């Protein structure tokens, strides 16, 4: 069977070669329970294949192994407008063909294609270094020197790389020193907190603040600080400069490195990336001990991407633990990557089976998503059949309605205020 690493909540993140003998039975049991493997596959899994075990368990609980990115391609362009070295606001274009490779999703996992922002100089040697472009890249860096013909044959995970080791491991050191830096875009990411009876998932994201994407740095923001979005002007200035800032959901901007791999036998080059992680901030330490390296604000994003002006060692100073994110608990529905619907993001009340009590952050999310309905938006793909959706309890569909409406879009015009 085709193994997908994020299907499994493994009991350990160690590769098979580092497992203690007493850990192996529990690991096999965990894999079988999670994937509902039949007796026909039992002998194959228990064969001890490093490849099988790597795919099933290596990625599972490394930091930041799941994200959500629900904006349509056109919205992403507006949501990540930027300022160049001269302070001019620009709207990035998609790299040719890449908009079609991107699919909005409530539940993105490693090996899927995700949107990233990077300097256009990486694709066009004549382009200014501070001109940005959107690209769709594979999550899980495939080094340019990888000699196999199939990236899935890699025997280790590259979905994340630790900031403190980035110059010690060849897979990350080479692209970092070459200036191959990118910004991974997402609505937010999921993380699992160890609890008495398993693991509790949380959705973690930027607070939606009054000053918008170019806000000043915040210090010691708590997990529920949230303010209404700012107003924005409309239209374009001369030269194609974007006049108004995006007033919708503020995208999470995570630092990453990327590489370009070409199959040994020839073929289309594959661009792929790794999310850089740092120690968790104080308000996230109770959930996990690591977090993505967050770039807070336009200036940090500009510095990270401008490899011409900001050299590698200087850029590494941007990789700091920042206490600026907010979060809310979600249901275990998100645990399975095959589930791709608004229910993944819905806040839940951990202390009650009743309707969850709305927090400031969840109210802001519901308000924005229910009132913002662009006319052009790609629908997310889900493995649920129409029969399965129809059989769901009405209250589940109702609670997810606002987010679902926002993703699919209606006939209303985009929100401009």
Image (tube, grey):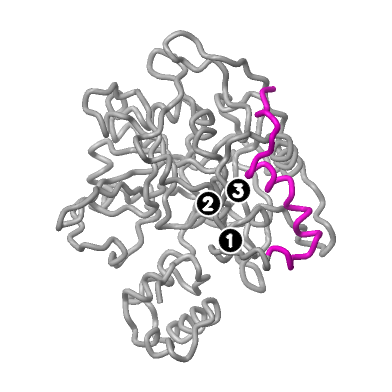
314 relative to 227 in the view: left or right = left
The disc at residue 51 is none
Circle 1 residue: 192
Q: Quadrant of the C terminus?
A: top right
Q: Position of residue 363 (x, y in %)?
A: 76, 41
Between marks 2 and 1, how big is the CA–CA gap?
A: 12 Å
Crowd tier of the residue under label 1, counting other residues whose Cα lies within 10 Å: few below 14, some 14–19, many 20 or above: many
Residue furthest to the left:
265
| Residue range (magenta) | 389-417
Crowd tier of the residue under label 2, counting other residues whose Cα lies within 10 Å: few below 14, some 14–19, many 20 or above: many
Between residues 72 and 201, which one lies in front from this camera angle?
Answer: 72
Q: Nearer the viewer, mark 2 or mark 3?
A: 2
Between residues 235 and 352, which one lies in front from this camera angle?
Answer: 235
Please report the residue visible at 70 percent of the width from the left and 41 percent of the height from the top. 365
Q: Quadrant of the N terminus?
A: bottom left
Q: Position of residue 268 (x, y in %)?
A: 24, 49
The disc at residue 204 is 3
Between marks 1 and 3, how big is the CA–CA gap?
A: 11 Å
- The answer to if 60 sits in the magenta stretch is no
Name the element at disc 3: strand
Circle 2 residue: 67
Which numbered disc flags the more N-terminal residue, 2 or 1? 2
Between marks 2 and 3, how big is the CA–CA gap?
A: 9 Å
Please report the residue visible at 43 percent of the width from the left and 55 percent of the height from the top. 112
């Amino acid at each position: 069977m085709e193994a997908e690493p994020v299907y499994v909540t493994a009991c350990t993140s160690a590769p098979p070669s580092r497992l203690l003998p007493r850990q192996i039975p529990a690991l096999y049991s965990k894999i079988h329970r999670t994937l509902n493997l039949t007796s026909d596959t039992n002998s194959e899994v228990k064969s001890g294949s490093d490849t099988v075990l790597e795919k099933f368990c290596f990625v599972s609980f490394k930091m930041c192994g799941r994200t959500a990115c629900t904006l349509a391609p056109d919205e992403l362009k507006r949501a990540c407008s930027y300022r160049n070295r001269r302070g001019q606001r620009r709207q990035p274009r998609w790299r040719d063909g890449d908009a079609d490779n991107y699919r909005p999703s409530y539940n993105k996992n490693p090996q899927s294609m995700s949107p990233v922002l990077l300097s256009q100089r990486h694709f066009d040697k004549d382009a200014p270094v501070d001109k940005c472009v959107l690209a769709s890249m594979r999550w899980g860096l495939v080094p340019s020197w990888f000699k196999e013909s199939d990236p899935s044959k890699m025997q280790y995970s590259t979905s994340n790389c630790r900031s403190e080791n980035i110059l010690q491991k060849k897979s990350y050191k080479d692209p970092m020193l070459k200036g191959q830096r990118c910004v991974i875009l997402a609505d937010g990411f999921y993380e699992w907190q160890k609890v008495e009876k398993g693991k509790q998932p949380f959705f973690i994201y930027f607070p939606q603040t009054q000053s918008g994407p170019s806000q000043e740095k915040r210090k010691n923001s708590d997990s529920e600080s949230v303010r209404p979005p700012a107003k924005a002007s409309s239209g374009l200035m001369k030269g194609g400069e974007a006049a108004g800032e995006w007033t919708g959901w503020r995208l999470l901007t995570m630092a990453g490195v990327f590489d370009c791999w070409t199959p040994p036998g020839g073929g289309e080059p594959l661009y792929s990336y790794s999310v850089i992680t740092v120690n968790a901030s104080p308000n996230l330490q109770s959930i996990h001990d690591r977090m993505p390296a967050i770039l807070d604000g336009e200036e940090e994003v500009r510095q990270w991407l401008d490899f011409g002006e900001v050299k590698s060692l200087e850029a590494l100073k941007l990789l700091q633990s920042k206490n600026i994110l907010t979060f809310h608990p979600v249901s275990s529905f998100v645990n399975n990557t095959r589930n791709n619907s608004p229910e993944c993001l819905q806040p839940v009340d951990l202390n009650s089976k009743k309707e969850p009590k709305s927090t400031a952050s969840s109210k802001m999310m519901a308000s924005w998503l229910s009132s913002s309905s662009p006319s052009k938006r790609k629908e997310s793909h889900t493995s649920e059949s129409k029969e399965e959706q129809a059989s769901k309890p009405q209250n589940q569909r109702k609670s997810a309605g606002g987010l679902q409406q926002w993703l699919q879009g209606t006939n209303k015009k985009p929100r401009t205020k």
